Image (cartoon, grey):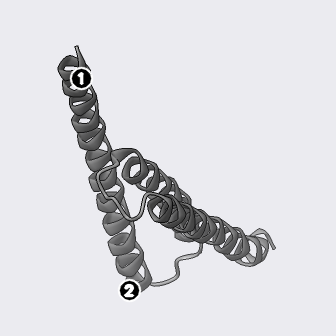
Amino acid sequence: MLEHLINIIVPNIAHFLELIGVFIILYSAIKAFIKYGLLRFDFGDERIKIELSQALAMALEFKLGAEILKTLIIRTIDELIILASIVILRAALTFIIHWEIETSKRGSHSNETKITENKE
């Protein structure tokens, strides 16, 4: 009885979490594109890149949560291998994006410091 309930509810929750991740990606990509358009596609503004990276990281967190929920309904070793591969790839992507965000933040902070020093 409980197993049947889990097999019905968990996939729906996982799909909902994945859908949230897709909407976050779509919204942030459109927002970044509009901001770059307003700047006439001057890619020198690191803030837009950081905002987009943060949104992508958040979307990956939702999608990773969905994958974790899917572990409740695994039936075969093949499904486990596929799911583990997806989780590893998404976790690696999240790590890389967080690393890029930190690198960009440090780079934009040092650029702001240089600009302030040059003005003085």
In the image, taking residue 37 as reference, residue 115 lies left or right, namely left
The residue shown at (76%, 78%) is 8
Amino acid type at circle 1 is Thr
Q: Nearer the viewer, mark 1 or mark 2?
A: 1
Please determine whether, in this image, residue 109 is positioned above or below residue 85. Answer: above
- Where residue 92 appears, as percent x and y from the top left, is 29, 59
Give the residue number, with chain letter if any, for mark 1.
113
- Rendering quarter of residue 57: bottom left
- 80, 63: nearer the viewer: 63
Q: Is residue 58 left or right of residue 5?
A: left
Label 1–label 2 contact, CB within 8 A: no
User: Callout 2, which amino acid?
Assistant: Asp
Q: Measuring 38% from the left and 80% from the top, which residue is drawn there?
A: 82
Marks 1/2: CA–CA distance: 53 Å
Give the position of the N terminus as an image quadrant.
bottom right
Name the residue tied to disc 2.
Answer: 78
Which labelled disc corresponds to residue 18? none
**Helix, strand or loop for disc 2:** helix
* x then y, percent, for residue 59: 52, 60
Q: Nearer the viewer, residue 67 or 46?
A: 46
Q: How many marks?
A: 2
Identify the residue at horizontal 32%, vertical 68% (top origin). Answer: 89
Q: Nearer the viewer, residue 116 or 47?
A: 116
